């Protein structure tokens, strides 16, 4: 099945061929205008860039929001008049309004979880890498793919617009538990802002479903010759499982959202019962707020894996490439992804241990939750084994991948505390949970995203990012991540609940005033460091040093495509695949890597694949003199770590 | 080539400068317009505030420009450094530096954790002051030791490997794709370790929900609403009377059913204090009137949601009085606190109740002092059900026989 091009792929090829001669072909979009190339593009590479850039913009919005509420937590008694300049009436005389605090927290969570880490991460890299790495000319349905982006874009716009409305954006937390989210009178953030939130999320889900269906069908049907499932890079495996999780769990969130909309506007009682709100007895009876939580977390827990699995895939690929070693336990890695995917559907109740749920259910969820830690542990050990005896090149992507492993260990271990119901009793809804998920999701998954951007930037923009700025970005971000989120565990262990506007009212909380100041300034440092990334990203995309074809000497197929983007990805035939993607430092090979498209015959023939497209300018490794078992000679400073100065020297212009 | 680069960079700088100036000018204009509008509203007299605004705008503009200048200076310095080929990091091997950074960072990270353990770990809750809390503490200790060990070992290995296996031209990476025995070991060992905590966890979980009680627990109802708590103690009959949410009025905030004799001597307590006797099992019945709340008393490891329409409860036995805890913590002002544990709206952060654990005698005395509901609040006849603004189609719902909940 893999050897034949699907009709769509042929179509994509066709579009490419048809540029010049025959325009009267029945298709009318042959001539590419600005609109079809940059706006309503159906090319997976362009769509990936669109997802990425939208994700980055949303990320900065979400990040800056967090600074506003962090300032409030650090200085609850100090008016900050400049806030009025930023949020207007919500900070009269520099004192942040408590309901706007909740709105900021809600939008921060929503934006980060869905818009940055789901669409920005999985959307970007699934789109970019699936066709490239399995050897396809485009997605199974480029049109659906385009729609997927524009639904996402529309939902982003609605979410952003909701910030500016009179009553403020949604405020019941990113989990939008009813009745708070169902009763507009219950808080300002439950009015129009909440409606917009629901509309935006519905569009978002549509977008992610269209994307996911596309990813699954592309991976299953459009692999090039020789690309059996067990030769796919781990990235593609991760994207496959992510997409499956999305398809199976997002519809449940839709149903939860639709029922919530009914409760809000049609007077139904799915989630409402026996309510007296501000002295008024409501007629709703028989519903259950807990039902919403079951539906929400049936998506919600898979969602956290939807977020982390692409990051796993990306880091596996990058760690293997830069340690110059095969990933340790390829099949075990796939197995753990599979295990995690399956188990993530039966652990949702660990978010609900103290809701008054039947204790027997609690027992079941304890067991399932702690079982899921086993594949997570296997992944960690396999990462470590991959680094062991490696020959590690610290590209910025590699730094972020190693950072990811560190953060995943830290956050996964606290998951064991929370997953054990009795321990969760005093910890539920405290800062301990905030620490846990910001480390394991907020930081680890974001690190995966950064790693991916640094690594595949050459594939997206044909340019290299500045490595030195990348190092600076990494070390500052890594330090800030721990400085911000590690101390939060102590706050939680002291019994301070989360989503508190100020730590002033409770003895348990007020002793942490000094720590809150520390955390806030660390957060400012962390967000500030992201501007280094932004600068690097923009400047490199426009003026960066041109990348050679295979800058990291990696094995996967995307590096066999030309640097300049073309429709259909490969100018000629799609290369066939002859090996798995992890032949790094294989004994007897002429180089410390053997790309997937190189056959045994090629090796026997002594084919020079390492200079392919790279030429003399090859930035990574000088070709070893003897070939065979001789160690590769690597001069990092001269080659791929150089900045523009050495580029200037080399270009000599 | 670099000249070209500089040129582009300067263009970029100028562009940003232009943007910033435009922003300042634009900001001035809108702010000015607002001030003008306000002035127009106020009448022909010039609003002095508007003038003040102009001054502050000017200051802001100067500040903004200053910041821009600073950025420009930094930028130009870096360009200049490049021009004269001044690069302090020129001879650094980036790979070696990053590898060393992992060693350094690992050490600082360890230091940071030790520092936190010294200065912030003491802030965490003291050992739980309840019977089931002590069991949770055990589980906590086991889990802490286990995960702590794994944390230290894996993080140490990670940082060490990053440092140790940095790229060297003299070495070749080991081609080592698999080892099933190893993988089996590190699947089984965590699985076994987890089995231990799971088994213990399940036992503690069952103990929490089915505690062995020597005595019938005292039953107290804890009712949450935006943004306060109301408590209900039973009277001499040790029974909490029936309630119906439809009976809730200003006079009858808990909707007690005046037809139920058991409700008559119930005591509705509005103070921000929850009194409990020490060493006596107590069941707190949580109820929410409007939205979700959480009944969270950290020092006793008590945590359960208050859910509209679904009564929940938590049974526990406090083992230390407030006074004992004051002595233990050396803090004469110490108080047990109950907080709201689930987001309920704008003042969620401000729903404090002080929990006072005292000996049985003081507790009894305090309860006796509280007036009973029927004398204090209830009208002589049963209050009529309040009207609701339900839409027409829903009135039928109101005719459904009133559902009453008894708490015993
Ligand atoms: C070893 C694996 C993990 C376990 C056992 C685990 C366990 C838990 C548990 C029990 C909770 C609920 C705590 C509470 O609300 O009281 C929780 C919360 C959370 N976890 Fe994990 N977790 C694990 C890994 C992850 C990963 C990989 C992610 C994301 C990438 C993640 C993201 C979250 C988030 C976002 C929440 C908070 C949701 C909220 O209430 O807002 N967790 N985790
Ligand atoms: Cu979960
Ligand atoms: Cu609350």
Image (cartoon, rainbow, N blue to C red):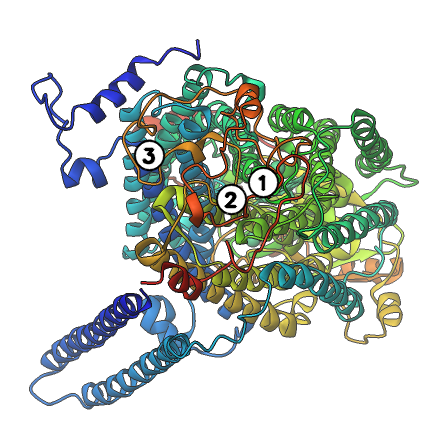
Residue in the image at 52% along x and 68% along y:
A525
Residue on which disc 3 sits: A203
Residue on which disc 1 sits: A321
The answer to whether the residue labelled 2 contacts the one labelled 1, judged by CB atoms less than 8 Å apart, is yes
Mark 3, mark 1: which one is toward the viewer? 1
* Relative to B139, B310 lies left or right: left
Query: What whole-number distance in Å separates the C-alpha atoms at marks 2 and 3?
Result: 38 Å
Mark number displayed over residue A552 = 2
* Residue nearest the observer in this picture, A379 or A517: A379
Q: Among all residues in the image, which is located at the extreme front?
A: A626
Label 3: element kind:
helix
Q: Can residue A283 be seen in this view?
A: no
Up-down: is B191 above or below B277? above
- Whether label 2 lies within 8 Å of ligand 1 gets the answer no
For marks 2 and 3, the one nearer the N-term is 3
Query: What whole-number distance in Å separates the C-alpha atoms at marks 3 and 1?
Result: 37 Å
The answer to whether the residue labelled 3 contacts the one labelled 1, judged by CB atoms less than 8 Å apart, is no
Up-down: is A270 above or below A563? above
């Amino acid at each position: 099945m893999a050897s034949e091009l699907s009709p769509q792929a042929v179509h994509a090829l066709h579009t490419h061929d048809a540029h010049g001669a025959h325009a009267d072909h029945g298709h009318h979009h042959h001539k590419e205008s600005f609109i079809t190339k940059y706006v309503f593009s159906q090319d997976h590479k362009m769509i990936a860039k669109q997802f990425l850039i939208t994700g980055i913009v949303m990320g900065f919005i979400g990040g800056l929001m967090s600074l506003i509420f962090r300032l409030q937590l650090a200085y609850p008694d100090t008016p900050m008049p400049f806030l009025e300049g930023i949020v207007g009436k919500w900070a009269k005389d520099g004192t942040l309004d408590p309901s706007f605090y909740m709105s900021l927290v809600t939008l921060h969570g929503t934006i980060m979880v869905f818009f940055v880490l789901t669409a920005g991460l999985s959307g970007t890299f699934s789109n970019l890498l699936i066709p490239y790495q399995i050897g396809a000319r485009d997605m199974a349905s480029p049109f659906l793919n385009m729609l997927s982006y524009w639904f996402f874009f529309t939902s982003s716009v609605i979410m952003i617009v909701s910030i500016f409305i009179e009553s403020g954006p949604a405020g019941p937390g990113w989990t939008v538990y009813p009745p708070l989210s169902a009763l507009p009178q219950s808080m300002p953030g439950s009015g129009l802002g909440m409606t917009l939130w629901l509309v935006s999320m519905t569009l978002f889900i549509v977008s992610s479903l269209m994307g996911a269906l596309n990813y699954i069908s592309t991976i299953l049907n459009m692999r090039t010759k020789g690309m059996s499932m067990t030769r796919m890079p781990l990235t593609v495996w991760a994207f496959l499982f992510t997409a499956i999780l999305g398809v199976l769990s997002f519809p449940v969130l839709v149903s939860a959202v639709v029922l919530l909309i009914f409760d809000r506007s049609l007077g139904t009682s799915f989630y409402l019962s026996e309510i007296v709100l501000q002295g008024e007895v409501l007629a709703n009876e028989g519903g259950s707020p807990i039902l919403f939580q079951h539906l929400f977390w049936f998506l919600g827990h898979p969602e956290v894996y939807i977020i982390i699995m692409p990051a796993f895939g990306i880091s596996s690929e990058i760690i293997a490439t830069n340690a110059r070693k095969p990933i340790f336990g390829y099949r075990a890695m796939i197995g753990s992804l599979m295990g995690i995917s399956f188990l993530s559907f039966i652990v949702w109740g660990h978010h609900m241990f103290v809701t008054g749920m039947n204790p027997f259910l609690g027992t079941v969820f304890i067991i399932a939750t702690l079982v899921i830690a086993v594949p997570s542990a296997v992944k960690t050990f396999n990462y470590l084994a991959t680094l062991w005896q490696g020959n590690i090149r610290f590209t910025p992507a590699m730094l972020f991948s190693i950072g990811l492993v560190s953060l995943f260990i830290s956050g996964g271990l606290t998951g064991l505390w929370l997953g054990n119901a009795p321990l969760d009793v005093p910890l539920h809804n405290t800062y301990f949970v905030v620490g846990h998920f910001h480390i394991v999701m907020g930081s680890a998954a974001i690190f995966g995203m950064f790693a991916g951007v640094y690594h595949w930037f050459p594939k997206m923009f044909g340019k290299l990012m500045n490595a030195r700025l990348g190092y600076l970005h990494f070390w500052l971000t890594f330090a800030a991540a721990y400085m911000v989120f590690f101390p939060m565990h102590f706050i939680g262990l002291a019994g301070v609940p989360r989503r508190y506007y100020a730590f002033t009212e409770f003895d348990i909380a007020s002793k942490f005033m000094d720590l809150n100041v520390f955390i806030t300034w660390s957060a400012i440092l962390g967000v500030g460091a992201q501007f280094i990334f932004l600068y690097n990203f923009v400047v490199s995309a426009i003026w960066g040093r041109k990348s050679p074809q295979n800058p990291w000497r990696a094995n996967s197929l995307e590096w066999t495509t030309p640097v300049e983007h073309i429709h259909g990805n490969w100018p000629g035939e799609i290369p066939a695949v002859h090996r798995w993607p992890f032949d790094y430092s294989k004994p007897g090979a002429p180089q410390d890597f053997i790309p997937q498209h190189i056959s045994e015959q090629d090796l026997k023939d002594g084919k020079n694949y390492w200079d392919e497209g790279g030429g003399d300018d090859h930035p990574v490794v000088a070709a070893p003199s003897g070939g065979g078992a001789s160690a590769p000679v690597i001069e990092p400073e001269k080659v791929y770590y150089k900045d523009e100065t050495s580029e200037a020297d080399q270009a000599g212009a | 080539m670099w000249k070209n680069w500089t040129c582009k960079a300067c263009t970029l700088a100028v562009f940003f400068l232009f943007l910033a100036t435009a922003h300042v000018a634009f900001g001035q204009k809108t702010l000015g317009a607002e001030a003008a509008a306000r002035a127009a509203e106020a009448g022909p007299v010039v609003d002095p505030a508007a003038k003040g605004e102009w001054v502050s705008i000017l200051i802001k503009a100067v500040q903004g420009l200053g910041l821009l200048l600073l950025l420009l200076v930094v930028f130009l310095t870096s360009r200049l450094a490049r021009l004269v080929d001044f690069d302090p990091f020129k001879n650094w091997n980036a790979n070696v530096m990053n590898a060393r950074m992992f060693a350094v960072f690992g050490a600082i990270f360890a230091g940071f954790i030790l520092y936190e353990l010294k200065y912030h770990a003491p802030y965490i809750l003291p050992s739980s002051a309840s019977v089931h809390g002590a069991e949770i503490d055990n589980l906590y200790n086991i889990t802490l030791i286990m995960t702590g060990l794994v944390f230290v070992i894996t993080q140490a290995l990670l940082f060490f490997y990053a440092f140790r296996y940095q790229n060297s031209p003299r070495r070749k990476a080991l081609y080592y794709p698999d080892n099933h025995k190893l993988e089996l070991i590190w699947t089984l060992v965590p699985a076994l370790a987890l089995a231990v905590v799971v088994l213990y966890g399940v036992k503690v979980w069952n103990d929490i929900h089915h505690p062995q009680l020597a005595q019938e627990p005292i039953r107290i109802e804890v009712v949450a609403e935006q943004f306060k708590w109301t408590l209900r103690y039973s009277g001499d009959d040790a029974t909490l009377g029936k309630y119906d949410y439809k009976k809730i009025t200003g006079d009858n905030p808990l909707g007690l059913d005046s037809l139920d004799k058991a409700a008559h001597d119930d005591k509705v307590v509005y103070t921000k204090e929850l009194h409990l006797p020490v060493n006596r099992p107590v069941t707190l019945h949580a109820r929410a009137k409007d939205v979700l709340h959480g009944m969270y008393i950290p020092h006793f490891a008590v945590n359960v949601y208050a859910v509209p329409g679904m009564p929940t409860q938590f049974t526990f036995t406090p083992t230390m009085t407030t006074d004992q805890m004051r002595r233990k913590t050396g803090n004469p002002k110490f108080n047990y606190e109950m907080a709201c544990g689930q987001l309920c709206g704008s003042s969620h952060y401000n729903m404090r109740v002080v929990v006072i654990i005292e000996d049985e005698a003081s507790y009894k005395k305090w309860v006796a002092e509280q007036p009973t509901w029927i004398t204090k609040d209830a009208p002589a006849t049963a209050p009529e059900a309040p009207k609701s603004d339900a839409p027409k189609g829903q009135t039928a719902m109101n005719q459904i026989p009133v559902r009453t909940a008894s708490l015993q």
